[in-house]
Image: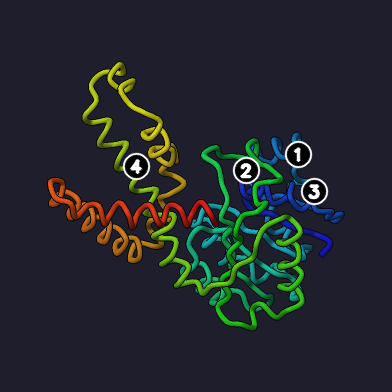
């Protein structure tokens, strides 16, 4: 792998570029992004050069799509005439079903392997990029079929994931979307809803002082921008609806049993899961 093209040089794309450099990658890293982002990425030393997609992709050994999901889907429609047959295209989208299906429908000349690094920050943009972002984090790979992992390009990409300090995990795209609807998308919506309820019930800022660190911890995800989540919610709506339905039913159960000891079971089960999360 000599040339990497990163489409979308923001937090994830920029962090991947920095992580590659820190892991010893000595080839070229080119960015495809807005003029402002390219200038900032060059100033920070994140990429070597900024190019339009149609000039960068024909020379790429790895095309890394780190755009918002809607842009990833659009880019996949245009890549096939541009890519080298021996190239690998991958992505960092937070949902996988539509992306993997679109890639396998439109990419005929080269290999594709869906991906989702389980890493991030509340901050956005290339200025927040961090070469250590993926270290000790799960990096999900979502092949449509087992052979997607068996090409030389996919095996090399796997090695680079390990070299940047991440832990590769393989799962099917539909199962990925079901799992993250519970582990990622539901927490975001729960945090957003909690913050909205508190905001509606708090009239004065002085009243916010009557809170402990639990409220800050529980509303951390509420800092996330809707623009970032719009495509995630739209492309995983079915799984998220099921997760929300289960969560609403559990909240109804809590409301109905506020005066009973049945909630002890809920607290015990919840604490067990919280302990598992922290020990893993």
Residue 55 position in % (x across, y down): 74, 57
Instruction: State how far apart marks 4 and 2 are (Cα).
Output: 29 Å
Q: Are marks 2 and 3 in contact (CB under 8 Å)?
A: no
| Mark with earlier residue (3, 4) | 3
Q: Which residue is mark 4?
A: 192
| Contact between labelled residues 1 and 2, with CB atoms less than 8 Å apart | no
Residue closer to the observer: 13 or 277: 277
Quarter occupied by residue 104: bottom right
x then y, percent, for residue 102 = 51, 71
The 10 Å Cα crowd at callout 4, few under 14, some 14 to 19, many 20 or more, is some
Q: Residue furthest top?
A: 206
Element type at marker 1?
helix
Could you give the CA–CA distance between mark 1 and mark 3, rounded to whole angstroms?
Answer: 17 Å
* Residue found 60% across the figure and 59% down from its top: 138
Of helix, strand and loop, which one carries label 4? helix
SS for dot 3: helix
Picture residue at 69% right of the left edge, 51% below the top? 16
Q: Nearer the viewer, mark 2 or mark 3?
A: 3
Label 3 sits on residue: 22
| Between 23 and 65, the one nearer to me in the picture | 23
Helix, strand or loop at label 2? It is loop
Q: Which x, y percent locates residue 131?
A: 71, 45
Q: Which mark is residue 42?
A: 1
Q: Are marks 4 and 2 in contact (CB under 8 Å)?
A: no
N-terminal-most mark, 2 or 3:
3
Q: Is residue 93 left or right of residue 65?
A: left
Q: Which label belongs to residue 34? A: 2
């Amino acid at each position: 792998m000599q040339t990497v093209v990163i489409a979308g040089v923001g937090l994830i794309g920029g962090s991947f570029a920095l992580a590659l450099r820190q892991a010893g990658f000595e080839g070229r890293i080119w960015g495809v992004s807005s003029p402002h982002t390219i200038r900032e990425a060059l100033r920070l030393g994140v990429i070597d050069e900024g190019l339009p997609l149609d000039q960068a992709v024909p020379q790429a050994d790895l095309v890394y799509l780190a755009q918002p999901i809607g842009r990833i889907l659009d880019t996949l429609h245009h890549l096939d005439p541009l890519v080298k047959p021996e190239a690998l295209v991958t992505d960092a989208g937070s949902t996988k079903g539509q992306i993997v299906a679109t890639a396998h429908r439109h990419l005929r000349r080269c290999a594709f392997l869906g991906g989702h690094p389980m890493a991030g920050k509340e901050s956005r943009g290339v200025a927040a990029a961090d070469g250590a972002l993926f270290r000790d984090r799960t990096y999900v790979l979502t092949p449509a079929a087992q052979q997607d992992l068996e090409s030389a390009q996919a095996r090399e990409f796997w090695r680079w994931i390990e070299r940047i300090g991440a832990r590769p995990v393989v799962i099917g795209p539909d199962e990925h979307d079901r799992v993250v609807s519970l582990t990622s998308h539901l927490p975001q919506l729960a945090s957003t809803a909690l913050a909205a309820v508190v905001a509606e019930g708090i009239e004065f800022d002085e009243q916010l002082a009557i809170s402990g660190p639990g409220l800050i911890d529980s509303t951390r995800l509420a800092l996330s921008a809707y623009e970032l989540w719009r495509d995630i919610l739209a492309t995983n709506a079915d799984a998220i609806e099921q997760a929300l339905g289960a969560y609403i039913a559990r909240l109804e159960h809590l409301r109905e049993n506020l005066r009973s000891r049945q909630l002890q079971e809920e607290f015990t089960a919840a604490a067990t899961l919280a302990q598992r999360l922290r020990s893993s």
